[in-house]
Image: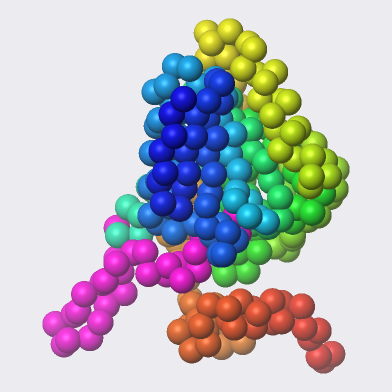
Amino acid sequence: MNEIKQGSVDYHAKNGRAYITLNRPEKKNAMSDAMWLQLMDAYDQAESDDDVRVVVLQGAGDDFCAGHDFSEVGNQYGDGGFDGDGRRRRPSQRARLKYDKIYVERFQRIFTFIKPTVALVKGYCLGGGLYMAESADLVIAADNAKLGHPEQKLGLSGAAYLDAWEIMTLGARRARELLLLAEVWTADEAHRNGLVNKVVPLDELQNKGEEWAERIVRLPRDGVALGKVATNLAMQTLGITGQFSYGHILHTLATNMRWEPDEFNFMKERKVMGVTASNHERERFYVKPKSAE
């Protein structure tokens, strides 16, 4: 048995399973850059341990993951320095591309992982949290789960890291609905649309995860490995994994877009109101009725 505490991401391996737990419940397991690094370390450990046949990804507390920590969003590209007149410059496109490429590769790491992965989703599963769940092979959701991409209201307007996977899984119309309208679905809606495999009562989530993990663990190690290789090859042949080649480019462009006076600029408002207040104001902006002309 192997157990390593990794700050905000915990890793625990036993009985053929590797449990990776996002452990920041006071922030709904919102992911900081440090947590992303810890998460990748955990997958590395699971890959190198021959006794591990399945990874169970879960969140501590009441939620799976509310996405990326908004207090870090917008600051991850570093300081753009100053021009010759002493005025502060925006971060360069090359700095944005470098960071976004690394960020997208983390989802690719989970999506193409050599061993089967099961995500146990409860409470909020939003933004980067949903990408993590979608990157898993199997997703079991508790009946209180809320899944969606509200971060699309920050200006991406339907551009996503896993858009090819979502189009194949949900169909083009539903995928556009989820992204373009920044929908947040209930567990039952997510199940009807094919976003999750199964919905169970919250108090049965852990047991159902154990049941599915045990069924995978009983398979031969080589059979499991060959099955994942075949799956990854099929994804490549279908062109789905190409989404990881362009996802970071779309994100870089979206973070450098121009905002018009009548549009809600979250990054600007966050500097004035803070993360929580600007989030609430963003939601009010998108649901308020427009005056009739």
Q: Is residue 183 visible?
A: yes
Up the image or down, 113 lies above or below 91; here it is: above
Q: Is residue 114 left or right of residue 48?
A: right
Q: Is residue 43 left or right of residue 133?
A: left
Where on the picture, by quarter, is residue 139?
Answer: top right
Up the image or down, 235 lies above or below 269; here it is: above
Identify the residue at horizontal 45%, vertical 53% (top origin): 8
Q: Nearer the viewer, residue 29 or 36?
A: 29
Image position, residue 171 (x, y; %): 76, 41
Image position, residue 174 (x, y; %): 78, 49
Where on the picture, by quarter, is residue 17?
Answer: top right
Snapshot colouring:
rainbow
Identify the residue at horizontal 49%, vertical 64% (top origin): 69
Q: Please, what is the dominant secondary structure of the magenta stretch?
A: loop
The magenta stretch spans residue 84 = yes
> In which quadrant of the rendered image does the C terminus lie?
bottom right
Q: Nearer the viewer, residue 268 or 29?
A: 29
Q: Is residue 157 left or right of residue 21?
A: right
Q: Is residue 57 left or right of residue 255?
A: right
Identify the residue at horizontal 52%, vertical 57% (top origin): 24
Q: How many marks?
A: 0
The magenta stretch spans residue 63 = no
Q: Is residue 164 visible?
A: no
Image position, residue 186 (x, y; %): 81, 54
Image position, residue 182 (x, y; %): 70, 62
Q: Most extreme residue toward the left, as rendered?
A: 84
Identify the residue at horizontal 81%, vertical 90% (top origin): 291
Span colored in magenta: 65-94
